[in-house]
Image: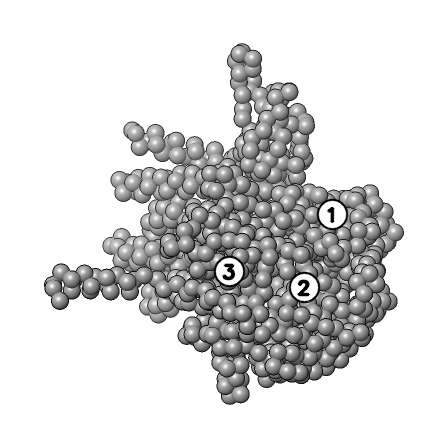
Amino acid sequence: MRRKIQTRLLIVALIGLHLAVLFAGFIAPYNPETQNRELPYAPPVRVHFNYSGKVHFRPFIYAETTGQGTLDEDFSRPYPVHWFVRGDDHQLLGLFNSNLHLFGVDAPAQMFLLGTDSFGRDELSRLLYGGQISLAAGLLAAFVTLLAGAIIGTISGYYGNWIDEALMASAELFLALPWLYFLLVVRALLPLHVSATMSFMLLIAVIAVIGWARPARLIRGVVLSARTRDYVSAARGFGASDFYLLRRHVLPQILGVLLTQAALLVPQYVAAEVTLSFFGLGVSEPTPSWGNMLSVLQQYSVLRSCSWLFAPAVALVITSVIYWLLADTIRYSLKSS
Amino acid sequence: MKPSAHFTAVVCLFGASYLPVIATAQATSSSEEVDRLEDVVGQYGGRLVVGERAEPKTLNPVTATDSVSREVIGRINADLIEINRASQQTESALAKSWTISKDGRTFVLHLRKGIRFSDGHPFDADDVLFSFAVYLDESVGSPQRDLLIIDSKPPTITKLDQYTVQFVLPRPYAAAERLFDGFAILPKHILEKPFHDGHFDQVWSLNAPPDQIVGLGPFRVKRYIPGQSLVLERNPYYWKIDHDNRRLPYLNELAFLFVGGEDSQLMRFEAGETDVISRLSAENYALLQRDASHLNLELTDLGPSLEYNFLVFNLNDLRGKKLDSIARKQAWFANLNFRRAISAAIDRDSLVRLVYSSRGQALWGNVGPGNRRWVDAAIPHPQHSLDAARQLLKSAGFSWDKAGQLQDASGAPVEFTIISSSSNAQRMKMATLVQDDLSHLGIAVHVVPLEFRAMLDRVFQSFDYDAAIMGLGGGDADPNPEMNVWLSNGSSHLWHLGETQPATDWEHEIDQLMQQQMVTLNYQKRKQLYDHVQEIIAANLPFIFLATPDVLVGAKKDVGNFHPALLDPYTLWDADQLYIRGIEKAAIR
């Protein structure tokens, strides 16, 4: 019973996380690339409910006047937070333009719920838009890896003999490749500037190319054991084709493995994208991604004074925990079924 | 001997062997022509610890090129004439006086008599002749050799007597006496043999035995621990004395700790493990300022440095190289109004605020306000204006499409890439700010961080880049070290390398002016010539100058005689005068 509730909560959290990132344009109050050069490194704004002794239901803020790590509020005028405001243009789901935002304050105040970065860009907006890149990279890379791993693993496990040996030998080769250096080499061979889309695709390609080996081996194992079952031999005796056997008897076995692997690989690949962007090998300025947002923390002074810039790391941890707990739940339900 | 006395004696001897041996200053004799520094007072004793971001590569003054090696080498060697970093003027050093002939070609230097090297061996004109023979020797291949070659000819150096040396230059060279700073005088008695045997470039590596590394500087090598530290000790024969006629340096030891990077340098300084720190970034400076009072630190902002950061467009001759896409873009880059528009669109004030936390100055020329002697205050400083930029672009034949994207006369969208060194956070930030500024003009700029050497390769060798953000300068205030940037055939003539003839009229004019100022001895006339050069540069924008940082240094409050300066080495140039306050003469720190 408790586990059922836990599963439900996890799925809700997962969907919530992905929806928040998907609707980044709506939830984020500002454009992620707009620089506010007067307010670099502004700490998160303080949301007040108390005004001259009275408690208001509508929260309000005071405008931040200086950045550089200190919170200086201009108490001359409170700015109440409004819901469903009109603001910067954005594209919803890449399909249609809109300028509706979930919340906001009147100009000239700006509501930096998670502070600003070194160029005065809103950290929350960048976190949400950056999440699009990082999570999409993780999901896509996991999908490609699992697809490749499933196909190769199935072929390897089902047909056996020299196909199996050849495929598994190449899997070992890919397992041994140091992926960071591989990416460095590929990046060096490309022209100086690659478009954001290109570099995103490249990122996914490299992560997937390196990563198919492990799921392939797992799936090969499952297929191998499924293939030798009695009911499979019986069906073959009745004249079932390979394709029918695969579809009807073998593949359902690997579904569980695939799901668990998916839940484990997605956070791993999101972290891989974060790592690559951290080193400047992924998406480049000014497009945000959790990795390149964290790279500013390589400077000691920023690390010491601007704790709000750790937000992408926190987001990554939360994402990973949700996925791992989900993986646990799937594994448990597989075992008990 | 009674057992207890025996025991005591053994203990005493044993203990004494652990007492560090301090090289105490030798008493001065009347025949020694020391350099008396009137205004300098201090206390003997103590050890100054400095954190270095990298390890020195060698202690050989003739072959060393990296800044850490040169910083250490400068403390254990001395020159004939030194540039006082604070006043930026020349001072007598090993040469107590000199005369210059009227035509500016002949220098007669009178050396100090009775001076000795750090091993006690006497110094005289033979050492000077030997040193310059080594510097000028082509097989040794010193990178400093080029500084002495004027008009493709080396100077003629003759010994007039045991303490007098004559230098004859092929032609008059302005501020020639500044040349002598940086040419360490080598001990002939130690280095003559390796020089004649042909393996001079191998002498005085870091592993050389300390008693072989002999010089005339305030310190001499005591101990090198690879990967950890290099400790210098007082040179007991150093030839400078203070106000009270006591021989300098005050410090017993000067230790260089290899801390591995800028951030660890800061952390060690904060923790009190090092005494002095130089070239802080503005953010680190702000960090230290918050804790300065209770950490007992003295932080100094020396004002704008002599370095200049700029955006340079690739105007190299790309014929024969397969770089067609860049060659097409060069049609934009070569247009003066295009460059002027870019310059007008860059918000330099925000740049200084965001990159240097306002501890810097915007630049419109290669000589900034920190170089008081040579800056031309009359060059225009056009303010940030997008309207002016748009006008300039219109007049250059550009237009905007419906989406606001800039396009050239043929309808091609204007976009280019800026490269910069990924290890330099300040220049990367400048690139992002310029990218944002130019987006307001409808220009799509892409910022590509590159590893430092990869970037240098593209800028100097392959020319495979559109634009780059780099920095130059900072060596000396005098215009002469800038020659290789502004001469059309100069090795750092970045925007168009390898010119055999000046590519434009204004480059030709700069060539003539720079050659002329090089041989003009009168400061006023030289200044006029160099002002004119600055005006031409500002009008033609081969570089779009951005900003210069302030020189930010720090030291513990108990470091005495701390007089940091705008010229390298900012904090240790007067290491012979530094002392630790509150040190008792007899105590060992």
Residue at 58% in and 72% down:
B184
Q: Which residue lies furthest to the right in this view?
A: B395
Q: Identify residue for label 3.
A: B246
Distance from Cα at disc 2 to Cα at disc 3: 24 Å
Left or right of B234, for residue A58: right
Residue B176 visible to the viewer: yes
Query: Of the residues shown, which amino acid type is indicated by label 2?
Result: Thr
Query: Of the residues shown, which amino acid type is indicated by label 3?
Result: Arg
Q: Identify residue for label 1.
A: B346
Residue B433 visible to the viewer: no
In percent of width and height, residue B515 lies at 80, 71
Q: Is mark 1 on a helix, strand or loop?
A: loop
Residue B74 quadrant: bottom right
Pick the front one: B136 or A43? B136
Whichever of callouts 2 and 3 sits on the residue coming sooner in the sequence is 2
Depth check, mark 2 against mark 1: the one in front is: 2
Q: Identify residue for label 2.
A: B90
